[in-house]
Amino acid sequence: KDKVTIHTLKRQKQSGQKICMVTAYDATFARVFDEAGADVLLVGDSLGMVVQGHDSTLPVTMDQMVYHSAAVVRGTKRALVVGDMPFMSYQVSVEEAVRNAGRLVAEGRVGAVKLEGGAEFADVISAITRASVPVMGHLGLTPQSVHKMGGYVVQGRDEDAARKILEDAIALERAGCFALVLEGVPLELARQVTQRLSIPTIGIGAGKYCDGQVLVCYDLLGMNPDFKPKFVKRYANLYGSMTEAAGAYFSEVRAGTFPDEEHSFKSKPIRLVASTP
Ligand code: KIV
Ligand code: NA
């Protein structure tokens, strides 16, 4: 099994072979998805919400992204690992952006970084790319812009907004992005962007015409019973399985039936006499 690179993904677009991407935040989940056949593992700043319990991705820091990225890379053999650039790690200046992207590669050991934004970040993307760090773009519903968007709402629904997203997508390809996440946009817009670009598009809440798909792993595994937006499909009910398993363990501990002989260590019969007077 050859390692996935940015070149593999470009070939997949050309041959029409869909790109499978999922988020991961630690080595154990990374190993599961890598062995299940993921092409790309995204260490998403969504970890601010699903791991840390915040109500947005804004509090996530560079140190935290480096820590989780390194863990995911250690659990991965084949997939390309992409690390998210967190809020304020690339917006202040081109210099800071390049330094922070470099940290994700040098310390987090990722093979590429992702950042949110359109044509206004073309200079940042070119500079990071020039430092030989591949950049994945991210357009549409961009969670770091939650206050500007006025909430987590579908983007590009009217013609002006849709044209702006298409133009931003073209600008990102020109700036050097190797792929582009389209989040929370109508499927017809995603179809046209995908057709227009030579780099692959990876959709989340963007319909079936994208070159690949990405989901937050806890969403597809059904680990949060209170979160079920329209674009999420649950492929398992791990919330149910995990509460059941934990409940069974607690019952056996309370009943004194765990640990039984099978789960205990044995020795020759011994009779201990304390040596202290
Ligand atoms: O942080 C994240 O999980 C993401 C994906 C949803 C694209 O950016
Ligand atoms: Na993200």
Image: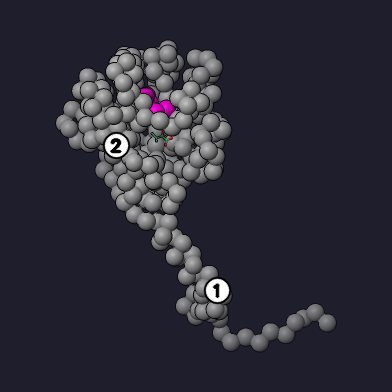
Residue 43 appears left or right of 269: left
Q: Residue 273 carries which label?
A: none
Res. 60 image quadrant: top right
Q: Badge 1 local density, few (<14 within 10 Å), some, or many (20+)?
A: few
Residue drawn at point x = 38 percent, y = 14 percent: 119
Q: Percent x, y for residue 1?
A: 26, 43
Task: Name the residue tied to disc 1.
Answer: 253
Residue at image position (58%, 87%) is 269
Residue 139 counted in the magenta span: yes
Name above or below for residue 187 compared with residue 196.
Answer: below
In the image, residue 137 sits, relative to residue 257, either above or below, namely above
Q: Are marks 2 and 1 in contact (CB under 8 Å)?
A: no
Q: In this view, does 201 lie above or below 3?
A: above
Q: Which of 153 and 203 is in front in this view?
A: 153
Compared to 130, does 6 lie above or below? below
Q: In this view, does 91 lie to the left or right of 182?
A: right
Res 113 visible: no
Mark 2 Cα-neighbour bin, 10 Å: few <14, some 14–19, many ≥20: many
| Residue 152 visible in the shown view | yes
Secondary-structure class at tag 2: strand
User: Which one is nearer the viewer's eye here, 74 or 159?
Assistant: 159
Q: Residue at x 69, y 84 (%)?
A: 272
Q: Is mark 1 on a helix, strand or loop?
A: helix
Residue indicated by mark 2:
213
In the image, the segment drawn in magenta is 137-142
Spatial separation of the CA atoms under disc 2 and disc 1: 42 Å
Residue 178 within the segment the image draws in magenta = no
Check the picture and name the quadrant holding the C terminus: bottom right
Overall secondary structure of the magenta section: strand
Question: Amino acid under label 1?
Answer: Val
Q: What residue is rendered at 75% in x and 82% in y?
A: 274
Residue type indicated by callout 2:
Gln
